Image (tube, grey):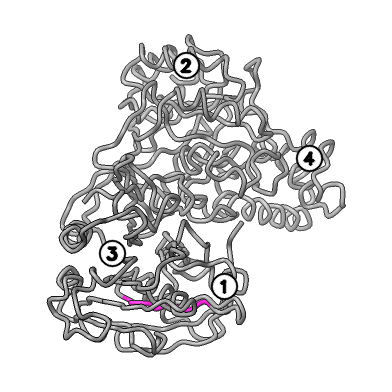
């Protein structure tokens, strides 16, 4: 069973975020960008909180065996996890679900997201740059202190942010707030030949609408999104992470958390 | 008085606690003959379990989802489970509105949408043929709109090799009074000869009478406990559901202790069991077997770990109180 006991090897405070590096070789080898993991967020003797928290790693290095997580300690479970010091031993289940699929022919990759899935985009950015893909990352957040710092990204990645709320993500996608770097002479969607998103449920409808408005043709595989949300069991038994798709209800933990945007109902 | 389970369970644990290679590798002669617990000793079909721990209804879905990980096909797969009770299943598929959700509460979970299930056809065509190949018995939890629908559902089960027993959760039928329970259980008994476990709502006003009426109407075993009807508020929205998990542990324990002295049937105890100590308390209160729900939902290793810890506890108590194993 894919249970792991990561050991915290580093912990840094980055604004309101906590960057933690965990040594967990098996998981670091198995994890792909967009896949999730479920972390127990209570000491062994406690039953509270009961549910594991869903995390999207910001990186997983199979060579060093280190998985990197970026935690926003906005509730008691994540606050406990973020407070674990170096040397602490954790309890994590993963990888969970399916990650992003980067097409062979992709040369210009647009990443855009807000909320708990943003670290998955950092992970994907690193993997894409390693393949020689040009990457632009757009992140919307409620404040500058919850934006991932640029040093977490390869220097080749063009990183544009908006700190006035997650709801500004569609506008970022439309290019409304952008100064327009060399890669983005037009709207970001027109530049990209693949789009990978990290969304929360409230952002799904406005982002789908924006993608529809910004692309002439929208082929399957062009736009994928990792969907944030709880995955209580992570194995498809509790049916508590249902997502409405054009093919009926699907489970975020088994069929996702990455879905083709065309399949999702907004 | 030492409950009758201790005889079987103590021997089972003694066997499990042994470190001989034969046992560690799952020697059938040792672990099955000595460890068997029968939840339906008076039913010709019997319902023999190789472990005193059971996956509570729906905690592992239909088992198919986790069969590979837990090696449910093998009795000694290390999963620690003697049997698995499925999600409550109706004659036709049901979709919950709003969709199922698990809302975290202090030391508990509020489960909404427990009615959602794929219906009997899925069980018959997709699940039961696989269950039939497993060493771990599968007990089908059933729900229906009325006794007629229940009869139609149960009538289809006897021919399914993979279904080894039926659990009838009274709360899913809105039944909490002894007379109504008697009618429902009698209808179920008339429709199926399979081992019949009646699950009692822990909040029932007359729990002992409810259990007695189920026993008198043909139940082979009783089960405790269903979740407690409760409400949680998330983002300003109220949600009704069933409260489960450790928050219910004291209620489950009290109900088991109360019922065990009133009804002479095998009793599946439960309610927020997370550790061996929780299971041990239920066994001491009179449970024949113990069901794990939330524990399995959050960690598939839970039953194996509880069983191993029970073995350690049993070994320690055997050393401390050698006379307990010799009644």
Residue A196 at least partly seen: no
Membership of B43 in magenta stretch: no
Bin the neighbour count of mark 3 within 10 Å (Cα to Cα): few under 14, some 14-19, many 20 and up.
Answer: many
Quadrant of the rendering where the C terminus of chain B is positioned:
top right
Examine the image and state in which quarter residue A117 appears.
bottom left
Q: Secondary structure at mark 4?
A: helix
The residue carrying pointer 2 sits among few (fewer than 14), some (14 to 19) or many (20 or more) residues within 10 Å by Cα, namely many
**Front of the two marks 2 and 4:** 2
Q: Which chain is disc 1 placed on? A: A
Q: Nearer the viewer, residue A257 or A75?
A: A257
Q: Disc 3 versus disc 1: distance between alpha carbons?
A: 24 Å
Which mark is on residue A28? 1
Q: Residue furthest top?
A: B190
| Mark found first going from the N terminus, 2 or 4 | 4
Residue that label 4 marks: B31
Q: Residues within 10 Å of mark 1 (few under 14, many from 20)?
A: many
Density class for disc 4 (Cα within 10 Å; few <14, some 14-19, many ≥20) is many
Residue B102 position in % (x across, y down): 34, 50
Q: CA distance from mark 2 to mark 4?
A: 32 Å
Alpha carbon distance from label 4 to label 1: 38 Å
Which residue is at the front of the view, A217 or A203?
Answer: A217
Q: Which mark is residue B154?
A: 2
Magenta region, main secondary structure: strand
Give me the C-alpha separation between circle 1 and circle 2.
Answer: 48 Å
- In percent of width and height, residue A34 lies at 42, 65
In front: label 4 or label 1? 1
Q: Say which residue label 3 marks.
A: A199
Q: Residue at x 30, y 27 (%)?
A: B174
Q: Which residues are magenta?
A: A67-73
Number of disc labels: 4
Q: Residue at x 62, y 46 (%)?
A: B68
Q: Earlier in the sequence, mark 3 or mark 1?
A: 1
């Amino acid at each position: 069973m894919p249970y792991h006991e990561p050991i915290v090897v580093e912990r840094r405070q980055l604004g309101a975020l906590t960057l933690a590096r965990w040594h967990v070789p098996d998981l670091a080898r198995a994890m792909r960008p967009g896949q999730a993991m479920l972390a127990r967020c209570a000491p062994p003797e406690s039953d509270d909180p009961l549910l594991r928290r869903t995390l999207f790693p910001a990186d997983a290095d199979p060579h060093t065996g280190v998985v990197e997580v970026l935690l926003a300690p906005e509730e008691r479970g994540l606050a406990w996890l973020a407070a674990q010091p170096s040397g602490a031993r954790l309890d994590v289940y993963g990888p969970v679900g399916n990650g992003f699929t980067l097409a062979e022919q992709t040369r210009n990759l647009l990443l855009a997201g807000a909320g708990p899935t943003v670290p998955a985009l950092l992970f994907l950015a690193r993997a894409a740059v390693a393949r020689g893909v040009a990457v632009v990352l757009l992140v919307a957040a409620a404040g500058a202190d919850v934006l991932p710092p640029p040093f977490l990204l390869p220097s080749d990645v063009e990183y544009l942010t908006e700190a006035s709320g997650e709801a500004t993500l569609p506008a970022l996608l439309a290019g409304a707030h952008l100064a327009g770097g060399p890669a983005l002479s037009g709207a970001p969607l027109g530049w990209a030949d693949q789009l990978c998103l990290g969304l929360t449920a409230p952002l799904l409808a406005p982002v789908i609408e924006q993608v529809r408005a910004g692309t002439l043709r929208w082929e399957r595989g062009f736009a994928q999104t990792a969907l944030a949300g709880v995955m209580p069991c992570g194995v498809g038994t509790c049916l508590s992470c249902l997502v409405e798709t054009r093919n009926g209800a699907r489970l975020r933990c088994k069929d996702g958390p990455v879905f083709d945007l065309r399949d999702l109902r907004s | 008085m030492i409950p009758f389970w201790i005889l079987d369970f103590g021997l089972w644990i003694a066997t499990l606690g042994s470190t001989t290679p034969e046992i560690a590798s799952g020697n059938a002669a040792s672990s099955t003959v000595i460890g068997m617990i029968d939840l339906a000793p008076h039913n010709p079909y019997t319902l023999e379990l190789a472990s005193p721990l059971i996956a509570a209804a729906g905690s592992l879905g239909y088992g198919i989802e986790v069969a590979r990980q837990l090696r449910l096909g093998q009795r000694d797969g290390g999963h620690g489970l003697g049997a698995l009770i499925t999600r409550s299943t109706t004659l036709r598929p049901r979709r919950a509105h709003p969709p199922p959700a698990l809302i975290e509460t202090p030391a508990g979970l509020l489960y909404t949408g427990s009615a959602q299930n794929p219906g009997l056809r899925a069980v018959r065509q997709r699940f039961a043929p696989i269950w039939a190949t497993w060493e771990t018995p599968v007990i089908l939890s059933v729900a229906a709109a009325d006794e007629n629908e229940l009869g139609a559902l149960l009538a289809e089960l006897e021919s399914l090799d993979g279904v080894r027993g039926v659990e009838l959760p009274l709360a899913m039928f809105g039944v909490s009074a002894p007379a109504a329970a008697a009618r429902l259980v009698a209808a179920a008994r008339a429709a199926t000869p399979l081992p019949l476990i009646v699950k009692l709502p822990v909040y029932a006003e007359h729990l002992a009478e409810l259990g007695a009426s189920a026993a008198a109407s043909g139940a082979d075993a009783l089960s405790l406990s269903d979740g407690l009807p409760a409400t949680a508020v998330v983002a300003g929205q109220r949600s009704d559901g069933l409260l489960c998990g450790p928050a219910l542990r004291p209620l489950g324990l009290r109900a088991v202790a109360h019922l065990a002295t009133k009804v002479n049937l095998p009793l599946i105890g439960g309610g927020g069991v997370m550790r061996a100590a929780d299971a041990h308390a239920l066994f001491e209160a009179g449970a024949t077997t113990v069901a794990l729900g939330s524990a399995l939902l959050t960690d598939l290793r839970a039953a194996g770990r509880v069983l191993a810890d029970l073995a350690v506890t049993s070994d320690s108590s055997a050393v401390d109180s050698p006379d307990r194993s010799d009644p």
